Image (cartoon, rainbow, N blue to C red):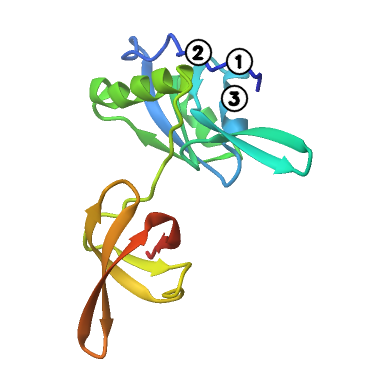
Amino acid sequence: MSDQPPSIPDFLHPSPEGWQWVVFHSKPRCEKKVENLQRLRPAKIFLPCIERIHNYGARKRVNHIPMFTGYVFGMIQKEDRRWFMQNPNVANILDVVDETQFLVPLKAIAEALQNGMNLEVFPDFSPGRKVQITGGPMKGLEAEVTEIKGKTTVLLRLDMIQQTVAMEIDMAYLKLLS
């Protein structure tokens, strides 16, 4: 990828006759390979990426990683669906039911990325979800999210000796349990 800010794709609109919007579920670490499929078949593929900067001593390296791990958005011709499904980098193709509603956040994400905004994707830490604490003095404990406070803090309920303890913890120290 180039160092230029990504431009808003001009194809983020409802699909014309004979085309359809889909979400490609890619195999692990194959999102950019799925994006490149548009060179082989008529397709419009959008892969929103976020910039990660890694410092290696005096060297700095900039990487562009997919914003939504495992997912790539595309508008494909309906008759090409089977061809895309047979590609070894595509695990599944999800249909888009309401294209208009689907495209609103996609356009907003593309515009935010073009304007240089720092976007971050967080897991769904909604109340009732089970999580494991991965850092701090409570590392290793499992808990349930009871409330979300601010942007980076959740209130957890820990069940110990049939008692409930409420505590605030940074989301960076939480991992969703399935």
The local secondary structure at tag 2 comes to loop
Q: Residues within 10 Å of mark 1 (few under 14, many from 20)?
A: few
Look at mark 2 in the image and give the residue it sits on: 7
Please provide percent x and percent y for residue 134.
47, 67
Front position among marks 1 and 3: 1
Quadrant of the image for the N terminus? top right
From the viewer's perspective, is 8 left or right of 124? right
* Residue shown at 37% from the left, 13% from the top: 18
For the residues bearing labels 3 and 2, Cβ distance under 8 angstroms: no
- Mark 3 lies on a secondary structure that is helix
- Disc 2 residue type? Ser
The CA distance from mark 1 to mark 3 is 22 Å
Quadrant location, the C terminus: bottom left
On screen, residue 109 versus residue 150, left or right, reads right
The residue that disc 1 covers is 4
Q: Which residue is mark 3?
A: 37
Q: Nearer the viewer, mark 3 or mark 2?
A: 2
Q: Amino acid at mark 3?
A: Leu
Q: Position of residue 169 (x, y in %)?
A: 35, 62
Q: Which residue appears at 39% of the width and 46% of the height? A: 122
